[in-house]
Image: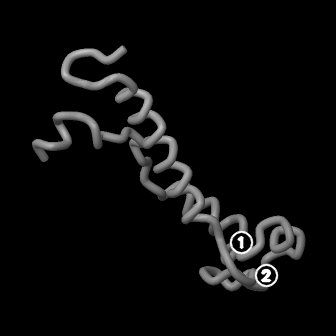
Amino acid sequence: MAGGWSRDGAVQEQIDSTVEDALQRARSELPRGESLTHCEECDEPIPQARREAMPGVRLCIACQSERDKQRTTYSGYNRRGSKDSQLR
């Protein structure tokens, strides 16, 4: 049941779209290609077990952890269907 000016199923469509956007963003951040043997930031060797577990890895664990800490948080709220998004 829709409320206000929205049509039936609009809320579920917005939820589905938000989930799909999050999946696409996560998939786009996965490493691809051949793993490096040495970290591209600090030049420390990347352990063989890490290279096998995560194909395409380019950073050692320490550098990857630091990069993950610095990453900004994404809100994840999809505003495509809201009136506020049309005003921006």
Percent position of residue 68, x then y: 56, 57
Image disc number at residue 41: none
Quarter of the image containing the N terminus?
Answer: top left
Q: Quadrant of residue 31?
A: bottom right
- Type of amino acid at the residue the image marks with label 2: Pro
Q: Is residue 87 left or right of residue 61?
A: left
- Type of amino acid at the residue the image marks with label 1: Cys
Percent position of residue 75, x then y: 39, 42
Placement of 9 over or under 77, stated as above or below: above
Placement of 45 over or under 27, stated as above or below: below
N-terminal-most mark, 2 or 1: 2
Q: Would you say the residues marked 2 and 1 are in contact, meaning their CB atoms lie under 8 Å apart?
A: yes
Disc 2 marks which residue?
45
Badge 1 element = loop
Instruction: State the residue in front, 47 or 26.
Output: 26
What distance separates the C-alpha of mark 2 from that of mark 1? 7 Å
Disc 1 marks which residue?
60
Instruction: State the residue in front, 4 or 44.
Output: 4
Query: Which residue: 17% across, 36% down?
Result: 84
